[in-house]
Amino acid sequence: MPETRNSGNGSNGNGIRVGVYVCHCGTNIAGTIDVKAVSEYAAGVPGVVVSRDYKYMCSDPGQALIQQDVREYDLNRVVVASCSPLLHEPTFRRAIDRAGLNPFLLQMVNIREHDSWVHLDKQAATAKAKDLIRAAVRRVALHKPLQKRRVPINPNVLVVGGGIAGIHAALTLAEAGKHVYLVEREPTIGGHMAKFDKTFPTLDCAACILTPKMTTVGSHPRITLWTYSEVMKVSGYVGNYRVQVKRKPRYIIEDLCLGCQECITACVYKEGKTPDEFNLGLSKRKPVYLPFPQAVPQKVVIDPETCIEFKSRKCKKTCVEACGERQAIDFTQKETLEEIDVGAVVLATGFRSFDAARNAYYGYGRYRNVYTSLEVERLINAAGPTGGEIVLRDGKRPQAVGIVHCVGSRDANTNRWCSKVCCMYSLKLAHLIKERTGAEVYNFYIDMRTPGKGYEEFYDRLLDEGVHFVRGRVAEVSDWAARSSEEGKLIIRVEDTLAAFVRRIPVDMVVLSVGLEPQADAQAVRRMFNISCSSEGWFLERHPKLAPVSTFTEGVYIAGACQGPKDIPDSVAQAGAAAAEAMALIDSQFVELEPYTAFITEEECSGCKSCIPLCPYQAISFAEEKKRAAINEVLCKGCGTCVAACPSGSIHQNFFEDEEIFEEIEGVLAYA
Amino acid sequence: MSGKPKVAFYWCSSCGGCEETVVDLAEAILDVAAAVEIVFWPVALDFKRKDIEAMPDGSITATFLNGAIRTNEQEEMARLLRKKSALLLAFGACSHLGGIPGLANLFDRESILKTVYFESPSTVNPENVLPLTRYRDNGHKVTLPDFHNTVRTLDQVVDVDYYVPGCPPMPRILGAALKTLLSGDLPPKGAVLAPDYALCEECPRKDTKPGELSIAEFKRPQELLIDEQTCLLAQGLVCMGPATRAGCEAVCVQGNMPCTGCCGSTGRVQDQGAKILSCLASLVAGKEDAEIDHVLDTIPDPVGTFYRYGLPGSFLRRKRLNGVQAPK
Amino acid sequence: MRNRQLSPPPVPRGAFEPRIVAFFCNWCTYLAADLAGTSRMKYAPNVRVVRLMCSGRVDPQFVLDAFAQGADGVLIGGCHPGDCHYQEGNYKTLRRYHLLKRVLREMGIEEDRFRLEWISAAEADRLRIAVNDMVEKVRALGPLDLTPKAEEIQEEVTV
């Protein structure tokens, strides 16, 4: 039941009849703003027929109140003063729509996020609410009925990034019957997960669980897999994105290559000379190579930077000879640009490891036996550079290994955040190293973060395996020996905070547990897709709790580590969620666009052409026969830039007409 | 004389150009003289103020008042003529928008008088004589009108029915206005009696207007040899045409000079200077502060350029008078 | 031409409280203001926000009207250059801002009364700081008081 109802002064003489609704929002608004006084004030504003205040306007009874008033008081405009329109404008628009009033005859007033929640002075907050409501009443009187625009949705989906998140999203969508373009910039899909040996806490072999999925992607009839490709340009809008993809040349005709790798064996290079990217530079590859044995697609790549044929045009081309009748090698292949039309996009571009060289005091790059965690994963992996042997650079086995947590995480000097997965993978590496080498293993940690299913139990197991845990952030790694027993070792200096003294621990190998960071080109990518990044550089979700996979740009979804550090189960979960939301969009078949478009009144336009170059969407064109400018409503996004620029005032914007804004300005400044 | 509608012309703070427009009606003036009875026209006829005061209220069918309001005499006459007229028309840019005299709103009374009577290079005034508003000479009281700080448009003083735009209005526009008034088929009150679209529509150079203007430098008319065929904005000149109401058939442009905006804005615009500013700025080349400032440095006097005729009628009306207390 | 009458000036009640009209773009600054709210940050209550889709919609007429109607300051909030939700709207805003600033200076309106801030959706704190800073600067400048008073006609002109 309504708290109070005030009869308004009546219509303002223009037949405008406004209903004003002031929400208490429990005590969120009412605790600071005198909602009754505001409601009473509103009743006295010209044009207001009824003014109420109520505990929760967005609730069913709250909405019913408005609907009832629309009918009983013959209201033709509604003002709701409550939370941000970005939260509930759709709610109240739907409410009045159901009561038979055009949904755009509503104006919301933000007296919570912009008022009661940010001001301490109750009097000032109440006065501000009155000003804003008065302005809204004046503005809403000029609102015109508008219709949302319906456009059909293209049913295809683009997934950017072929790591575990991208793979899972693509498979989910493809299984649901959607056609998916999966674009990956490396020559193979698999992402970071393909480089892991085992995954925590189950110690599943990463390749064993990943490669079946990769193979399914490679052969799925509804997935167009474009590896060694990058998105260059995106245009359009939700449901109708046009994407330009650059396909880099492998110099191999993909359809003809069988992946037999004879060309690699036959290459004039007897052995590899180029640091192998997949093995993080720990081994060498030839100019023609397969990224890793289970690569999908199972096609080789030729690197033009190191291949002799590209440098001198005088190579014997033994690879071509080995390829024989298949003739899959084509040195003339060029980069191509493809254009695709999709309705939705899922960004799953993953993360980048923290560059350990930035923490000079850990000696990465200076001491040969300081490794990053990812490098050690490759050492441990049977298909890696050492065939699964954990050895030092000189080939000897380590007798003591130190694992340093939080490198580039929880650090005011580099990245403040916790990278979420490092404690777990550090425990995993401790287990594997102990198992393989029998060495003394030390984990140096600040806190042990093991929140997932089976994670704490895994930590317990490690405690029983004889791994040493030292609680303290490592201060430095050096080779300066203080006594003879430290000669030839790497010395880890750390404060053991539980024992309360500083320790020097000599080890043979140091493993730096590097944190997760946004990709180097995250800003460039997010600009292309017109989404935002958080201040740390992760793609920004629409809401941190309730909308983690959608963004503020409709039709663009995010999944996996590109949204923030997370482990494989969470990446897969998000990928499924993003796929589901993309599906929900596409299956609704039409998308409704806000009608905030600009339009030119033909008889007003003088053909001065000042507006033509202003639109980045090329929505404004000049009609030669009529010598007037015209706006294509479908292309117009409704920014209003041309409206402000038109020197004769001949361009107007739905819902943001000059007159509506003037009324709002004058309304906030008039006196109560 | 009876039966014929009564018409009056009066001039306030103006140059006399609007009276010229009446004269420039040429032969048409005879038709005018035949159709109406002119009851007041200080520049040409010998009627006095008290003749007007003696008339019944509303008995003048239409008064064409040109010139801006900046003295108390002008204000009094404006109010008097409003009372005595059925229709009051703001005739010409000065009464419509403030006009050239409106640029005095960048100064105050004291500094204007000081400049004119003491500081101007051609003035010889060793005793620093200043005109007074009241003076007694041999028992005779002499007065001069008081001079206001702020120049105002006619509609800032009295209610105005119609506007005849231009500095001066084209004789054709005046003729059309007279014809409309006498026809009895009156447009809505407050209308400007000229087409309601911008000058580019009528401009002979319209076809040379580029569709991709990006301005790296503005030029002033004396800085280049102005091409006689090409759009003036395209040549880098500030042409107010896009923001100015049509009706004059672009006579200035035909004279190879850019439009300076004397007819004011179209009906959709509230502040002509702001709109041309918005339009030109939007087209400036540059995305960084320094680049943009570099381009804007080539407009040395933005207020004088964008508000040449329209300063009193603009949102801000005048330069802020420091130290002036607002009335309670 | 509609002749917009100037608002009567405020009846001063106690110390001067600046009145600032702000034009915020929907995607960045308005969101940042919402975030400031959800984070319960506190800032001066002197600002009244007019929501627009893009800072590019800010017509210089709006800024001038705000001053004419009694605002002591005008603030425009938009996305950082390069990040405009509509690609380039904020560049147009930036250019108009620079030219309008010059006009305002010639018209005797101090620079601190007209401010352009680039505030992204995550920068709630930046908004808080900008608002508080602007309010203090305008407070120090005093009321704008644009209304020309009824002409003081009675006294002799003295120079």
Image (tube, coloured by chain):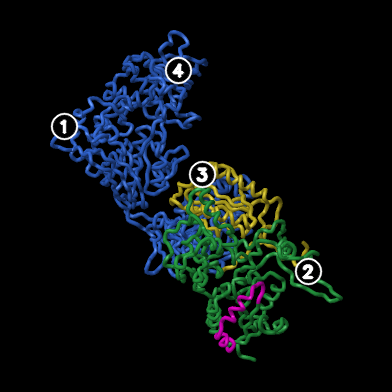
Chain colours: A blue, B green, C yellow
Separation (CA) of disc 1 from disc 3: 63 Å
Q: Quadrant of residue A635?
A: bottom left
Say which amino acid is labelled 3.
Leu
Q: Chain of mark 3?
A: C
Relative vertical location of residue A560 with respect to residue B195 in this rendering, above or below: above
- Residue A322 is labelled as 1
**Who's the residue at 19% across and 29% down the image?**
A266
Residue A664 in magenta?
no
Q: Are marks 1 and 2 on the same chain?
A: no
Which residue in the protein does label 3 denote? C35
Query: From the image, which quarter does the C terminus of chain B lie in?
Result: bottom right
Mark 1: secondary structure: helix
**Labelled pair 1, 2 in contact (Cβ < 8 Å):** no
Separation (CA) of disc 4 from disc 1: 50 Å
Mark 4: secondary structure: strand
User: Residue most toward the right?
Assistant: B138
- Residue A478 is labelled as 4
Graded by Cα atoms within 10 Å as few (under 14), some (14 to 19) or many (20 or more), the crowding at tag 2 reads some
Q: Is residue A36 visible?
A: yes
- Residue B132 is labelled as 2
Say which amino acid is labelled 4.
Ser
